[in-house]
């Protein structure tokens, strides 16, 4: 079969099983768009800005586990996509991004819409390719999908010069069945000796702690994690990226850890004697002060990426491998081994933990005459049965969604954890809704973040995506304001959002439903009304308390036991003193 | 401490910039970097000299290994090894006496005179980096016009070798 480069690209996507291609046309990709027009297998979603194409593909990937695929033109098409590529890179999301490039002969000549896409994206991709030979096009696409989806996943860029896709040049097409790269062979199986040592150490623990991250979600290891935790009866905390891998309503789950983690999680981290980190990378928002991180603990670390091990925190037993496979082996050893966990010590540990838990660190003012953002998220959980796909932007609303929604399943919580990209939420929700048209998809956002990709309301209309936008509108860039309150003596430098649009009218002008909620008593009936509109996008502009802060909070450079607590909770400001 | 890392990397366009970019993006120190194709033209051999604590060097080797184009690598300084660096040096030597003296110095250091004029001499020396430094230090009284050093190359001693 003889095909042009443009046809080959689209045919490769079909053979790879790609359902949706998120993109935006332009000069350098016109040949590819023409090939796209002449087939029906790969469905193209026309976004309104290339950043949104990458976030939508990213949301699709996070919800389904399948790679997200993007097609953008050269120059500004590629540069606009960079934020979304970097977002996916930081959270290890599988993605393949095809960027158009000027014709091979014009590369380096400062041609119209020319940019060194391979150079610009190099630090924020797992790998990238510049295709110089049409005969290598199919093989390159295969490699791109292979690299993006195996090992520690990540985005891969394929830069395709316009002459490669010229419809006049046809070559024979064959999509390779598999690919072998001598330079890329990720380790999947954990070392059996290390796994055994780790299990032995775990069973000696008196105050154990299981700390899990996004790797459990990406590695589809939630079932294995639950069996593991159950077999041991050890407490579990997750990072922001790991939410849902352990059910939020499971009594063994202590909530999120780190900067805005729960009191019980952070105290248990500080007090534990054996810590097992599973698919987590000891991010600075998690560890707090490195020198005082888990000061009494021996540490086991399972990660598929060797470079994540002992990067910031030196560990005692490293295990490089696929999280699901390593946990399966550990579960097998726990079932067949003779040794049991130290039940008495574990009971005593649970007593201590439940003491911390009884302090209700997440409580807030339930009698305010203003809408509390936490209450809005709790209500969202109630109305959606805790079963929605929730995307978020970045800031206070993101933390409240993470803290108060209560995710019981993996792949339901979709946010930009590593890069912290405002503007992520709405386009990510589009990707999720396309993947799961029958599911409830919610974008929790703020009046700041939503304006960074608000143009996508138009895309949502075109494809009939009934996303529910929950905008916690506090007329401030809330997290910036919070830091300015804590660290800059209330000097709210440029954190007030003035001249906000009328979000109701704005949404209506895009052809959707807009609602504004100002009083706490209106929240429930209006949210119920919004979610009853199954086939419509509804933008809920919820006017919340401007002064609310995210608690608990570990200030920069502080340890896990030095949390700053909410004024509403029963804990004194210095928990350490209370304990000693 | 100084570490020498030998790398076999795919001989592809952009491979070098991936390595160089990694060092700058992660603020790793790089003292020298040499690269050239091997007997298998699809592979390049790269030698990197870097300074850092063991912890940083461990991160550097892990991050290098993570680059898709890196096929395999070896930290030479982990075992016995041989290092060599080539230096080309152009100095002024205007008198017969100074020229004679330089020739004697070259004999001691096993260097070669590869070009000369009535006023300048161009020298080639292949030695360890340290020896090259000693040679430069011994050149008192000569004005050095140019120093061209290749950067360090290295190979493991004995039966050990780096191959795909």
Image (cartoon, coloured by chain):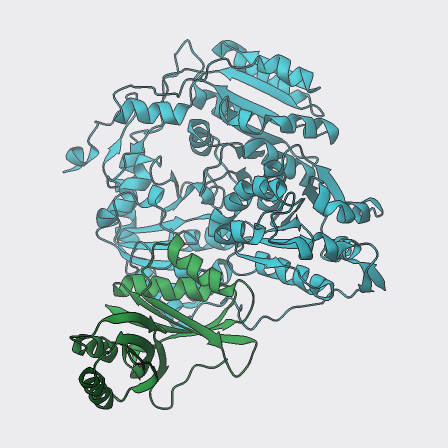
Chain colours: A cyan, B green
The structure residue drawn at horizontal position 74% and vertical position 64%, both measured from the top left corner, is: A175
Q: Nearer the viewer, residue A194 or A45?
A: A45
The structure residue drawn at horizontal position 18% and vertical position 36%, both measured from the top left corner, is: A576
Seen in the picture, residue A90 relative to A336 is either above or below; the reply is: above
Seen in the picture, residue A175 relative to A492 is either above or below; the reply is: below
The structure residue drawn at horizontal position 39% and vertical position 12%, both measured from the top left corner, is: A367
Q: Quadrant of residue A278?
A: bottom left
Q: Is residue A326 visible?
A: no
Label total for image: 0
Which quarter shows the C terminus of chain A? top left
The percent coordinates of residue A193 (x first, y second) are 38, 72
The percent coordinates of residue A253 (x first, y second) are 40, 42
Q: Nearer the viewer, residue A259 or A569?
A: A259
The percent coordinates of residue B83 (x first, y second) are 31, 81
The percent coordinates of residue A31 (x first, y second) are 78, 48
Seen in the picture, residue B105 relative to A252 is either above or below; the reply is: below
Q: Is residue B112 visible?
A: yes
Left or right, A228 with reference to A94: left
Left or right, A219 with reference to A269: right
Q: Nearer the viewer, residue A212 or A160?
A: A160
The structure residue drawn at horizontal position 32% and vertical position 27%, both measured from the top left corner, is: A483
Which quarter shows the N terminus of chain A? bottom right
């Amino acid at each position: 079969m003889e095909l042009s480069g443009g046809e080959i690209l689209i045919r490769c996507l079909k053979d790879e099983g790609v359902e949706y291609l998120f993109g935006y046309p332009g000069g350098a990709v016109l040949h590819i768009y023409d090939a796209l027009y002449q087939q029906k297998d790969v469905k193209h979603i026309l976004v309104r800005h290339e950043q949104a194409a990458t976030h939508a593909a990213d949301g699709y990937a996070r919800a389904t586990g399948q790679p997200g695929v993007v097609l953008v033109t050269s120059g500004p098409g590629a540069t606009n996509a960079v934020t979304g590529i970097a977002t996916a890179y930081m959270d290890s999301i599988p993605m393949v991004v095809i960027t158009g490039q000027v014709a091979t002969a014009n590369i380096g000549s400062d041609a119209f819409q020319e940019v060194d896409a391979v150079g610009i994206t190099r630090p924020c991709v797992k790998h990238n390719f510049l295709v110089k030979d049409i005969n290598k096009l199919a093989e390159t696409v295969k490699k791109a999908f292979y690299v993006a989806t195996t090992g520690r996943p990540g985005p891969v860029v394929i830069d395709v010069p316009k002459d490669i896709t010229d419809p006049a040049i046809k070559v024979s097409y064959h999509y390779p069945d598999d690919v072998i790269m001598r330079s890329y062979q990720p380790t999947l199986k954990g070392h059996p000796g290390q796994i055994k040592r780790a299990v032995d150490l775990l069973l000696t623990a008196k105050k154990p702690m299981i700390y899990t991250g996004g790797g459990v979600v990406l590695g589809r290891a939630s079932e294995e994690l639950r069996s593991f935790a159950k077999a041991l009866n050890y407490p579990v905390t997750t990072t922001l990226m790991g939410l849902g891998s352990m059910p939020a309503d499971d009594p063994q789950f202590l909530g999120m850890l780190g900067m805005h983690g729960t009191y019980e999680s952070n105290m248990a981290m500080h007090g534990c004697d054996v810590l097992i980190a599973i698919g987590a990378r000891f991010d600075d928002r998690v560890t707090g002060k490195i020198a005082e991180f888990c000061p009494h603990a021996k540490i086991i670390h399972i990660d598929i990426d060797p470079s994540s091990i002992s990067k910031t925190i030196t560990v005692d037993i490293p295990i490089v491998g696929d999280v699901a496979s390593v946990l399966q082996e550990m579960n097998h050893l726990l079932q067949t081994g003779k040794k049991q966990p130290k039940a008495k010590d574990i009971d005593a540990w649970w007593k201590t933990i439940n003491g911390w838990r009884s302090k209700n660190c997440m409580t807030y003012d339930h009698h305010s005459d203003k809408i509390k953002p936490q209450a809005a998220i709790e209500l969202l959980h109630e109305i959606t049965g805790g079963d929605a796909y929730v995307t978020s932007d970045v800031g206070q609303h993101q933390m409240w969604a993470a803290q108060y929604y209560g995710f019981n399943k993996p792949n339901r919580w979709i946010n930009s954890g590593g890069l912290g990209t405002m503007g992520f939420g709405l386009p990510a929700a589009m990707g999720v809704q396309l993947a799961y048209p029958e599911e409830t998809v919610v974008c929790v956002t703020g009046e700041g973040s939503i304006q960074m990709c608000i143009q996508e309301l138009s895309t949502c209309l075109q494809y009939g995506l009934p996303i529910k936008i929950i905008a916690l509108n506090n007329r401030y860039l809330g997290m910036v304001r919070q830091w300015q309150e804590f660290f800059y003596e209330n000097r709210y430098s440029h954190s007030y959002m003035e001249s906000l649009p009328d979000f109701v009218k704005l949404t209506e002008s895009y052809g959707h439903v807009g609602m504004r909620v100002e009083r706490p008593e209106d929240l429930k009936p209006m949210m119920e009304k919004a979610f009853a509109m199954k086939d419509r996008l509804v933008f809920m502009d919820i006017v919340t308390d401007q002064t609310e802060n995210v608690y608990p909070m570990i200030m920069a450079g502080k340890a896990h036991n030095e949390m700053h607590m909410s004024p509403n909770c029963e804990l004194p400001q210095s928990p350490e003193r209370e304990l000693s | 401490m100084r570490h020498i890392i030998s790398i076999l990397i795919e001989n592809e366009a952009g491979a070098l910039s991936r390595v160089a970019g990694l060092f700058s993006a992660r603020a790793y120190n790089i003292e020298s970097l040499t690269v050239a194709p091997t007997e298998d033209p699809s592979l390049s051999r790269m030698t990197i000299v870097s300074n850092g604590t063991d912890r940083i060097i461990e991160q550097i080797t892990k991050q290098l290994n993570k680059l898709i184009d890196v096929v395999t690598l070896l930290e030479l300084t982990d075992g016995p090894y041989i290092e060599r660096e080539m230096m080309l040096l152009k100095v002024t030597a205007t008198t017969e006496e100074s020229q004679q003296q330089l020739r004697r110095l070259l004999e001691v250091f096993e260097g070669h005179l590869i070009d000369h004029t009535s006023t300048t001499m161009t020298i080639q020396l292949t030695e360890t980096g340290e020896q090259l430094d000693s040679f430069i230090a011994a050149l008192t009284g000569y004005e050095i016009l140019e120093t061209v050093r290749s950067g360090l190359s290295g190979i493991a001693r004995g039966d050990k070798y780096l191959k795909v």
